[in-house]
Every structure is written in structure tokens, then in C-alpha cells.
Image: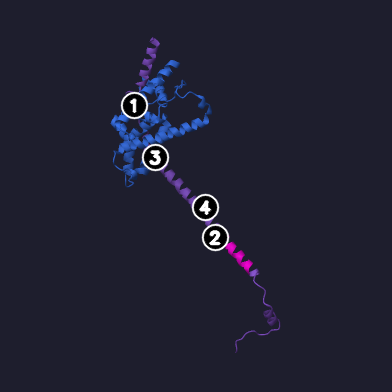
Chain colours: A blue, B purple
Amino acid sequence: MLKGDEIAFKTVVDTYKNMVYNTVLGFVQNLHDAEDVTQDVFIKVYENIGGFKQQSKLSTWIYRISVTQAIDFTRHKNRKKRAGFLSGLLGDDDQLSVEPVDFVHPGILAENKEQAAILFAAINKLSEKQKTAFILQKIQDMSQQKIAEVMQLNEGAVESLLTRARTNLKKLLINYYSSI
Amino acid sequence: MKQHLDIEKAATQTLNSLDNIQQHNANPFLYAKIKQRMEHQHKLAAIDQTRLMMRLAAVLILFIGINGLSFYALKKHSKAKQPAQSGANAFAEAYQLNTNTESY
């Protein structure tokens, strides 16, 4: 692939497409957007393969690009939303919205769908780093060591991020259930 | 108290709702879509490059045109401003006095 081999690129796409798609889906929480961002990720992979130093695994490098692209997309979308709904500025950011959440992850068990939708809304209230660590652990079932490699942090920092993510989510969920 | 416990339980259950999540399959035609998009981007880049070249060519033609016009105007202006013939020359010409010093 480093030599611009198309067959190699196709192999990479076929090997990692589900991994990239599911990671991105956890961030963007929309099937159509997730597919677009997945395409962006592979185009980035193709364009930047020359910069891949082979110090880490190809999968780790692709995960890193996926996370960056997904976060950039979410930031861009949120910026557009904020510009569109100035009234949102008056809202309380610490409160989990009680409006019905519309994202239902297709890979979730039927009996958990409603709760998972509430959880995804809460995940969006986390900081980017906490959100990344939590999604990689919960959706990609990644070990703390692998998360540390993807996020280029040490394992202790990842553990701390995961603990804070869980604590914050629990607080948000308790607030949510208290308000309904 | 019971209500608080229920809320706590609901929050914990929600927090664990992503356990055993199944991986969703990406579009089987993803590669074809990526290829199509890359080709489209390539075409757009080529169009952009052509546009840029055309703009540069237009600027260059304009630059050469302005230079040519300036040269022409300057030449015309300097011709018009050439000093009048000296009095002696005019006199010699009027009375057909040959000022040529060459001997035949």
C-alpha cells in the first residue's frame, strides 16, 4: 500500500471497515454520517500512508485517524447547531436533555435500546477525552493498554479518564432519572 | 429512600446497557464508494488546477497587453516630442544647399 497499490488499499478497507465504522458510529451517532466519516477516514489513510512510521500497528494508526476524524466531524456539526440555535446558549449544559433521543445503535440488544439511547445522549456531555476512552472501551471492547496506544497516553491516564467518565455518566443519569 | 435506590439502579442499568453490543457491518460497497469519491475529488482538483492556470494565463496576457500598449504609447509620445529642426538645417533644406560633405 505504501507504493500506492490499489489491491492493498482494497484489502485494508475490507479488513478494517467494520472497525472504523463502529468506532465512528459511537461518536457521530448517525448511520449516514458514520458512513461518510468512514469514507473520509480511508481517504485519509490512502493519502497519508507515506507518513505511517510503522512504530505502531496499522490498526492503531487507523483507530487514531478514525477518532480524530469523528471528533472533528462532531465539533463541526455542534458548531453548526450552535450557530443555528442561539437559544441553546441559555440551556443548562450539565443537565441531560429530557427530549427524546433519536439514536439507536443497531448493534444493541432489543431490550437495552431505550436505555442505550439515553446513555448515548449522556456520553455526548462528556469531555472529548473521556468520551473517546469510554467509546473505545465499551463499543470496541478495547483493553486499557490498547486505548492508551490509540490515545497516545499512559495507561494510568486512561484508567483515570475511564473512572471519571463513569462517575460523570452516573451523575448525569441520576439527574436525568430524577427529573422525569 | 426507595425512590433514590430505584434511580440509582436505573442509572447503573443504563450505564451497563452497552454491554454485549454487537458490531454493526459497514456498507459492503464501501470500497467502491471510496473509489468513486476519490475519483470525484481528483476531477475537482483537476478542474481547480485548470481554472487556476487559466486565471494565471489571463493575468499574464493582460500584463503583456498593458506592457505592449505602454510601449506603443511611449514611442508615439517621444516621436511627437522630437525637437524641431535647427534653423540652419531648415535654411539649407529650403534653399537646397547640400550639406553633404562627401565628394563624388
Residue for point 43% across, 15% down: A178
Q: Are marks 2 and 3 on the same chain?
A: yes
The amino acid sitting under disc 4 is Arg
Q: Quadrant of residue B96?
A: bottom right
Q: Secondary structure at mark 4?
A: helix
The label on residue B34 is 3
Name the front one of labels 2 and 1. 1
Q: CA distance from mark 2 to mark 3?
A: 44 Å
The amino acid sitting under disc 1 is Leu
Tell me if residue A70 comes above or below residue B61 in the rendering. Answer: above
**Residue highlighted by disc 2:** B64
Q: Secondary structure at mark 3?
A: helix
Q: Residue B68 placed where, x, y %?
A: 57, 63
**Residue highlighted by disc 4:** B55
Q: Residue A166 placed where, x, y %?
A: 36, 23
Pointer 2 chain? B
**Residue highlighted by disc 1:** A162
Any part of residue B22 in sight = no
Q: Range of the magenta residues?
A: B64-78
Q: Is residue A70 magenta?
A: no
Tell me if residue A92 comes above or below residue B91 in the rendering. Answer: above
Q: CA distance from mark 3 to mark 4?
A: 31 Å
Q: Secondary structure at mark 1?
A: helix
